[in-house]
Amino acid sequence: MNFDRKKYSNKLLMDLYEGLLRPRMIEEKMLILLRQGKISKWFSGIGQEAISVGATKALKDEEYILPMHRNLGVFTSRNVPYDRLFAQFQGKIHGFTKGRDRSFHFGTNDYNIVGMISHLGPQLAVADGIALANQLGKESKATLVFTGDGGASEGDFHEALNVAAVWNLPVIFVVENNGYGLSTPSSEQFKFKNFIDKGPGYGIEAVKIDGNNVLEVYDTIDRLSKKLRKNGGGPVLVEAMTFRMRGHEEASGTKYVPKELMDHWAKKDPLENYERYLLKEKVLTKKDIEKLRAGIQQDIDTGLDKAYSEELPVASTELEITDMYYPFEQKVVEESGNFSEKRYVDAISDGLKQSLEKYPELVIMGQDVADYGGVFKITEGFVDKFGRERIRNTPLCESAIIGIGLGMSIKKRKSLVEMQFADFVTCGFNQIVNNLAKSHYRWQQNADVVVRMPTGAGVAAGPFHSQSNEAWFFHTPGLKVVYPSNPKDAKGLLCAAIEDPNPVIYFEHKMLYRSLTDEVCDDYYTTEIGKANLVQEGSDISIITYGMGVHWAKEIMGNNPEISADILDLRSLLPWDKDAVRKTVEKTGRVLILHEDCLTGGIGGEISAWIGEHCFNYLDAPILREASLDTAVPFSPPLEQNFLPKGRLAQKIKDLVEF
């Protein structure tokens, strides 16, 4: 291994050596603790330390790094306290996730580190979001994110690099190419020879380095980060060649690795080779090594003693539930001033406009949202008023854009992401349910992101532009879900969703865009999230519904004046208004739950179960549900009308009344 110190001082060379030694010694201790059952799992980075240490030392402390399993050297090089690190590994409260997640699945803004989730790819887009926030804030900072050669097979890798290239974001993407994705060799992961071959395809610089040579890693990242800070953009792909000397995690072992390959890479050990070089150059002495090891061992022992002294967490159900969300108490902004007739679509546009004015840190992202104004023209003219930095067209990459929203949140910026159709959110599903929703629970980082979802059927758009998929998110703690049925609520709930620092999924029915008008306040106001609205009062039955169901219920009841019905518009689905539901059930004793989503697994099932559990004594009839068929949404209008529940609603109401 050839080391070129260039003009680097002895002090820097020694700093890099200590940087390598610290994670190696911690790892050796962790392997002992694993065998003793004192930690549950370990992902070893032995043999790969030079990448983490060299890269981290080359960056400024205020620049964000997004590491993975085998990047202990990032945490030690950022001087994360050992007692907190060891408490994290042991599931203690003093760790960074209050015992809720393990190993390196955490972030800490105190040290500008954002950890991974098990899905490997999503953190790449989060790095884009941090870099975008730096770019918008005119901060001359680089952001560095790690991935592995296996993880780079994920679609998130392509999406993150593509967006970074298109938006010229100052991100360094480091691929740790260690030859295996768990046990699967590179030859079964990809066909190309090297990851740097991908650089020209994205139109970005790509560099290949010896990942076991700490000086080469440091020098390369130092050069690239200075370039990114100076130019304010331009992502770079760095391929660091290395090898994993232990299993993917310790239980995996390394039997699948040919012995000659293991022997070859053992000779390239980053610590041993660098140590020999420093001894040869007389930068380091044997006495220095002994002194350093003794000091590090003392740090490890002290940190472990403090971690061991802490008991395992005492579970608090109340704390576990409340910590799913960033603490926020909504202060409703009441309607005031002039009112005017607005269509549903105009009310949404109005809410967006006024929120952009109220929150200069807010950015809107989505396909065709800029000059074209979105496929439904909701953001038409926004570019002229707010500029391209804040109204951003995106490539076709839902996962990356939602992940960018989380990255923006880390830098205290708000994001609104438009799904062109709610159906397309499947391509970003992982980011929503595993990253946005769990972020605050895991490491107290809120996700200040709203996802707008044009939803619903009735326009003969077929299976992929008509789905009602709110139940997917209703099931996910950490999210809030709203679904306005009228222009007034559409504006008020959208403004409230943007104001809320938690992730909010905002559903808007396409059929209502230009078919519904209402008197809407011209000025900014908000509607309370979690509060239902009784849109019609009656005494015979209760129809509990939301979205298009409100209008179906009103129409059917208008055609049947002999029946007196409460029509309760939930408006918010997560959280939903249990008090309002209880009140209407107690009043009428007969309940019909109506929604456009399919019957099985729909929100109506949960509400029905809750009523049966908590309001059974008030019921005079079985709880009935009406919903769409348990099929995909058909294209042809007669088939679609048969699919939707409206045609079956009158009979279901009659059955309820006559029971």
Image (tube, helix red, strand yellow):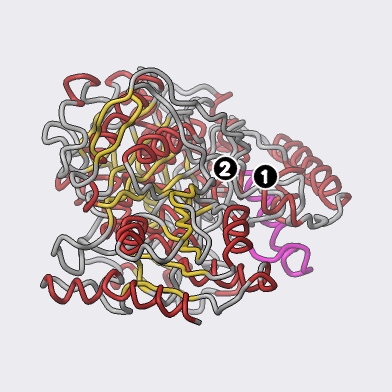
Element type where label 1 sits in the image: loop
In the rendered structure, does residue 22 fall within the stretch colored magenta? yes
In the rendered view, tell whether residue 20 sits above or below residue 434. above
Which residue in the structure is indicated by mark 2?
107
Q: Position of residue 587 (x, y in %)?
A: 60, 60
Looking at the picture, which amino acid does disc 1 mark? Phe
Q: Nearer the viewer, residue 98 or 310?
A: 98
Looking at the picture, which amino acid does disc 2 mark? Gly
In the rendered view, tell whether residue 54 sits above or below residue 88. above
Q: Quadrant of residue 354?
A: top left
Marking on residue 229? none
Left or right: where does residue 534 sit relative to residue 561? right
In the rendered view, tell whether residue 454 sits above or below residue 12. below
Does the residue at mark 1 contact the one at mark 2 (Cβ under 8 Å)? yes
Q: Position of residue 545 (x, y in %)?
A: 43, 60
In the rendered structure, does residue 94 fall within the stretch colored magenta? no
Q: Identify the residue at image location x=18%, y=25%.
A: 383
Outermost residue to the front: 562
Which residue in the structure is indicated by mark 1?
96
Residue stretch rendered in magenta on the structure:
20-41
Cα–Cα gap, marks 1 and 2: 7 Å
